Image (cartoon, grey):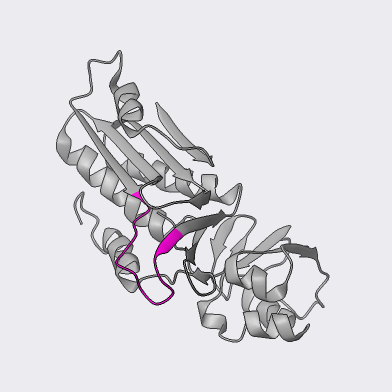
Amino acid sequence: MFTVRIQREDFDAGAEAAALARGRTDVGAVVSFAGLCRADPAEEGGRLLALTLEHYPGMAEEEIERHLAQARARWPLAGATIIHRHGRITPGENIVLVVTASAHRAAAFAAAEFLMDWLKTSAPFWKREEREAGPHRWIEAKAADDDAAERWQSTGSDTP
Amino acid sequence: MKIRYFAWVRERIGQEAEEVEPPLDVATVADLAAWLAQRGEGYAHAFENPRVVRAAIDRTHARPDAPIAGAREIAFFPPMTGG
């Protein structure tokens, strides 16, 4: 099963990973990555209270589906579940989940990393910070994230 | 065509979406951004550094030189910060 969900509600990473392999005998590896809202040591503006994730409805799903199709063309995947939340998310809460299933671990690991790298740089989501003091601030894109995604293009191989 | 704005591009322009009819010589995404930038102070602020504003044509990422003829929906937004 291949699923992409954009939702406001929280998700259960363990249950999603278990569901991907349930009732199957061809899955030898399940890799699960969850991205959480993290409160860094207080910066200018004070402690982080929450992130608000804005997204482009329709394009967010389509863009992730496009990269999922590329991952499926590149690695022998038995299934994948990608969930990205939007709305207001507080420190400690889930933001994103990528689960990949394959016969062997190499494909599951690589595909999960590929999907996360592209998700960060090309899925239309934007994070805005809400801190104790000071105005709301949009988080700036990181060059390191672009580099992480680009390396998948320069090598045609199955690992970055 | 419908234009949509997201994140700080939306905040600077002060609206989420609008219908526009640019003149015929507005042929590319970059042309459209330059044309929109002249529509007011908020637009000028949003497009003050066109290199950091990304675009999508009909929900697909588009480069500045992409032609806009036939597009139904064009979106402008900052570099993405999801994940």
Where the N terminus of chain A falls, by quadrant? top left
Residue A65's x, y, as percent?
A: 47, 43
- Left or right: where does residue A91 sit relative to residue A124? left
> Image point 39% across, 58% down: which residue?
A120
Count of residue discs: 0
Q: Main secondary structure of the magenta part?
A: loop
> Image point 71% across, 80% down: which residue?
B43
User: In the displayed image of the protein, which residue is found farthest to the top?
Assistant: A23
Task: Residue B28: tell me if it is visible.
Answer: no
Where the C terminus of chain A falls, by quadrant? bottom left
> Image point 50% across, 69% down: which residue?
A138
Image-quadrant location for residue A78: top left
Above or below, comparing residue B73 to residue A139 in the picture = above
> Image point 16% across, 36% down: which residue?
A105
Residue A101's x, y, as percent?
A: 27, 31
> Which one is in front, B44 or A69?
B44
Above or below, comparing residue A97 to residue A152 in the picture = above
B18 part of magenta stretch: no
Image-quadrant location for residue A83: top left
Residue A139's x, y, as percent?
A: 45, 69
Task: Residue B32: tell me if it is visible.
Answer: yes
> Which one is in front, B26 or A105?
A105
- Left or right: where does residue A22 sit relative to residue B51? left
- Read off the magenta span: A36-49
